[in-house]
Image (cartoon, coloured by chain):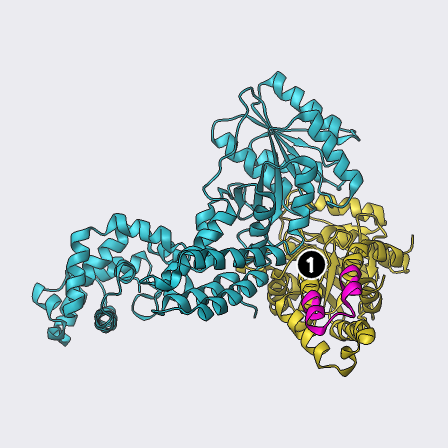
Chain colours: A yellow, B cyan
Amino acid sequence: MNWLDRLRESLARTRAQLTARLGGIVGAPPAEFFEQLEAALIEGDVGVATTQHILRQLSDRRDARDPAARLAALREILLDVLGAPAPLRLDPPPAAVLMLGVNGAGKTTTIGKLAYHLKTSGRTVLLAAADTFRAAAIDQLAIWAQRAECELVRHAPGADPAAVVYDAAQAVKARGMDVLIADTAGRLHTKTNLMEELKKINRVLSRELPGSPVERLLVLDATTGQNAIAQARVFTEAVGVTGIVLAKLDGSAKGGVALAVRTALGLPVKFVGLGEGLDDLQPFDPRQFVDALLTA
Amino acid sequence: MFESLQSRLQQIVQRLAGRGVLSEADVDAALREVRLALLEADVNFKVAKAFVDRVRAAAVGQQVLTHLAPGQQVVKLVYEELVRLLGGTTHALRFADQPPTVILLVGLHGAGKTTTAGKLAMRLRNGGRRPLLVATDLRRPAAIVQLQVVGQQAGVLVFSLPGATDPVAVATAAVGEARRTGHDVVIIDSAGRQHIDDELMAELVTMREATSPHQVLLVLDAMTGQEAVNIAQRFDELLRLDGLIVTKLDGDARGGAVLSVVEVTGRPVLFAGVGEKLDGLEPFHPDRMASRILGMGDVLTLIEKAQGAVDAQTAADLERKLRRAEFTLDDFRAQLRQVRTMGPLESLVEMLPGAVRPKGAMAGMDDRALRRVEAIIDSMTPDERTHPHLIDGSRRRRIAKGSGTTIQDVNRLLRQFEEARRLVKRMSGLEGKGKRGKLQFPLR
């Protein structure tokens, strides 16, 4: 099964719901159509503000008055919100990817899959086990390193995560490798001291790899509601998030909060996670995302 | 920045509470905002609608418009409805008559099951029980090691079967082991799974049948969005949930999902998970959660505490003085003392919602500062306390010396007192403000 099918399948529920909902009412009087659309978007975690923004744009468009053209117009608006695809910046090597997120978002699993993804596209990858806090996080990453056949830099549990990242940066340079991916402990964005720790890790990374592109990816659980916006905002303020990974999109959640995060902060989704297998991480394609969302 | 449910509702409540007469249009407008606030807090679309409809119906039925304080009446209704939604009173974990009590924790990936299992085990151990933790997450890398580490931290034995491939077999063996070894509670930590993954959900059903748990608890991330309803419904449908544990409540998520899940499943929330340390599991209090959501902070708790600490006579005296605007440093000191008998000032201030958090006079005062203030006032003569304008430069020097502080400290206190006094004058102008204003003083 290729990834598009997988994405389609994982979004099938959304699609079925949306098309059942919108298909039936696409020719309905505008008031009813907009009411249903509002319900569908909000139930997809798009959020009140972004939903209203989308509805306003749609109702302002001349072609939206024509029931037949409504869905096409809606698709265009959603695409516009999501923006162009934003691939990872990994050149010139060595590049670094710092994986960020709240507890349980799916950082470690995402790293395993991203490592495999980069490896299969011909890059050499080094993992840094900088989640030294959570029980067995290092062991978990070690197993992913093994699966993806990557090298791993690890310290003992409880070690300074910035020191792990420092060592990994030296290693990636010394070994002439392409990408360093650093795991970090999950932290609620409200914990000031933990956000300070993250800034330190980020500083070490930038300092030890001067001139290298550093991606700072915020992993969002697709099931998360509007709190994702606060997460994205605070992590961005702390270390300058460069993109979003929307994890666990294989559930029934719509991941609509990605639209809200994009609207509020301009952050692009770079990857989507669709399961626990090695190849279950895929580059985000806005067109396919919206198509999967809106077409039967 | 999008506003939290708490601050939104707080605004609305204040708007309502600050007005004498409410028209039906006012109620409707307020409830429209309540609905938006609920949606922003991730309360499910349908649940939010039902909530608003219920409050409107109740308001009409009780003829809010004819009440003396209609704003307060609506506040009460919104609050009561929130409490009702959240499950009424506090629910405790139920134990089996014949040990071991088997508790099965279920939920999505990353909800916090393993951490919660550790917290629960520690809590039960501290309560004099002998829990056994069971590692049945055989799929996620290092999940068993994680539980073993957590178990070690909690001082609780972790049962696992090395090399096992069937989680149900592990769970069944664990229950047998507990029976043999006299463990009175078995906590089964299951693997995270998507509720739409039929195969893995079927595995849980089998596990339920095989181990006959007395409590099947859904572990729910407080940050969950609209899907919370479907997730909880599916788990409940297949496993007959007994309750919920809400995790990550130490973040800033408003936790609207909790409301949704309790509404659609009718199951109580048993515990609230706060923080990553193993002692971060607290009983869940629907009333407190509701008042937090309402934007009243734990003002109810505060009022409760204040009622215990402020005796009626002092309150009456103070009110009389307020009215006659003869508030002196003696009164100021008496107020400070009462505040101190209510517990650490910081925790009191934390209970106050943003709007009534003290600004100006009392802002930034910790317990040590309070004691210093008391010392300064103690070093004044009775005359000075009644007539602070007598306190000139040389008296200030003497007071500073007597209280072991500096002249700057004395000056600051006098400034703060003047500020408080102005506040008092303003308050005493507001006749018949009733209980609320009185009890919150001097924290206002």
The amino acid at mark 1 is Leu
Q: Residue at x 22, y 55 (%)?
A: B337
Q: Is residue B395 left or right of residue B70?
A: left
Residue A22, magenta (yes or no) = yes
Name the one closer to the observer, A128 or B296.
Answer: B296
Residue A230, magenta (yes or no) = no
The chain letter for the residue carrying disc 1 is A
Q: Position of residue B148 (x, y in %)?
A: 65, 34
Q: Is residue B305 left or right of residue B88?
A: left
Q: Position of residue A192 (x, y in %)?
A: 53, 60
Residue B267 visible here? yes
B297 up-or-down from A56: above or below: above
Q: Position of residue A219 (x, y in %)?
A: 70, 58
In this picture, which residue range is highlighted in magenta?
A19-37
Residue A207 visible here? no
Q: Residue at x 48, y 48 (%)?
A: B84
According to the picture, the residue beneath numbered tag 1 turns out to be A220
- Point out the image quarter for the C terminus of chain A: bottom right
B414 up-or-down from B219: above or below: below
